[in-house]
Amino acid sequence: MSGGGELIGWVSFWKPKDEWYYLPLDERERLLREWDAIRAAALGHGATQHGTYECRASTAWARVSFWEFPDLGVLTEMVDALSDAEYYQYFAEENAFGRRTEDPYGNYMVAADATLAFGGE
């Protein structure tokens, strides 16, 4: 794990693939336990899961989960472990991650000022 100290936010949209529905119950339960243990390990390394929500309207995704990680290493370790445990064989995801900011418009203000300074309209 890196020790950068910058919090990493992660948003994960996800849904089951068709293959999930054809697994026997005991296999689905085994996989869920394994994946829960992987997520618990991330929590043990300082990650925080803020919740999982059912998606409604305007998206093809079934669920969205919000996490915060103490650094990118904890996130990548969790994702790699889930991959090794066949998670992505049965679930599709679209993710976004980034550093926490207390000034979400700051970079845009600097860019706009630079544009105007160089003759932008």
Image (cartoon, helix red, strand yellow):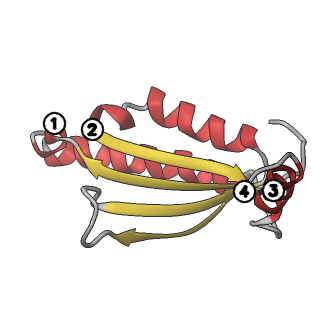
Can you tell which of label 4 and label 3 is closer to the viewer? 4
**Which callout, 2 or 4, points at the residue further toward the start of the chain?**
2
Query: Which amino acid type corresponds to the residue marked 1 in the rendered image?
Result: Glu
Residue 36, position as x, y percentages in the image: 47, 52
Residue 67, position as x, y percentages in the image: 60, 60
- Distance from the alpha carbon under mark 4 to that under mark 1: 53 Å
Q: Is residue 30 above or below residue 9?
A: above
Can you tell which of label 2 and label 4 is closer to the viewer? 4
- Distance from the alpha carbon under mark 1 to that under mark 2: 6 Å
User: What residue is rendered at 85% in x and 52% in y?
Assistant: 6
- Callout 4: 10 Å neighbours few (<14), some, many (20+)? few
Report which residue position mark 1 lands on.
19
Q: Are marks 1 and 2 in contact (CB under 8 Å)?
A: yes
- Callout 2: 10 Å neighbours few (<14), some, many (20+)? some
User: What residue is rendered at 82% in x and 55% in y?
Assistant: 116
Q: Secondary structure at mark 4?
A: loop
Residue 24, position as x, y percentages in the image: 13, 42
Report which residue position mark 3 lands on.
107
Q: Relative to residue 18, is residue 83 drawn left or right?
A: right
- Distance from the alpha carbon under mark 3 to that under mark 1: 43 Å
Report which residue position mark 4 lands on.
121
Q: Is residue 2 above or below residue 45?
A: above
Q: Nearer the viewer, residue 57 or 118?
A: 118
Report which residue position mark 2 lands on.
90
